Image (cartoon, grey):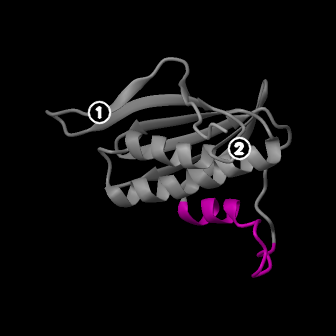
Amino acid sequence: MNTQIASVVVGRTRPVQSDAHSGTRSGIVRHALPESVQSPASARSLVREALNCCPEDTSEVAELLVSELVTNAVVHAQSRLVLQVEVADPRVEVSVEDLGGGLPLPTPDAPEDDSVGGRGLLLVDALADTWGCEQTPSGKRVWFELSWR
């Protein structure tokens, strides 16, 4: 069985780059990912690559949070998804769009200690500067923003 998964660049993209004169970073990348248990790992790698010119702690938090969003899309929406990373120094917005209906909400109570789920949006809420979700014509988009100094 072939365990590799493909990431397809979709739409118009501008690789995230640093401006040598001003030192600012900007760019946008979009990737289509399949409904696969391997998609969270692929998303982490894509975010790491897109944020290679950003502070390491910002990149690490973005990797953790995108893993949670992509896992939710794979488990709950059970659909392919589009990952978008947009950098506009000094912030990054990461979004995951899927074909699922209904908007996600954090679990109001903390999950049981031995529960395997229910913490993803709590992590997003705790670590992101801001986050949200919105209906799209084909499903929903969940996003978060991080900033650095």
The residue most toward the right is 102
* Residue 146 x/y as whole percent: 47, 52
Q: Amino acid at mark 2?
A: Cys
* Residue 18 x/y as whole percent: 25, 36
Q: In the rendering, which numbered label is found on residue 17? A: 1
Looking at the image, residue 8 sits to the left or right of residue 73; the answer is: left
* Residue 138 x/y as whole percent: 79, 25
Looking at the image, residue 46 sits to the left or right of residue 76; the answer is: left
Mark 1 nearby-residue class (10 Å; few <14, some 14–19, many ≥20): some
Secondary element at tag 1: strand
Looking at the image, residue 36 sits to the left or right of residue 17; the answer is: right
Mark 2 nearby-residue class (10 Å; few <14, some 14–19, many ≥20): some
Question: What segment carries the magenta color?
Answer: 109-127
The answer to the question of whether label 2 and label 1 lie on touching residues, with beta carbons closer than 8 A, is no
Please tell me whether residue 11 is drawn above or below residue 129 in the rendered image.
above
* Rendered-image quadrant of the N terminus: top right
* Rendered-image quadrant of the C terminus: bottom left
- Magenta segment includes 110: yes
From the image, tell me which residue sits under label 2: 133
Residue ID at (55%, 21%): 10
Q: Amino acid at mark 1?
A: Gln
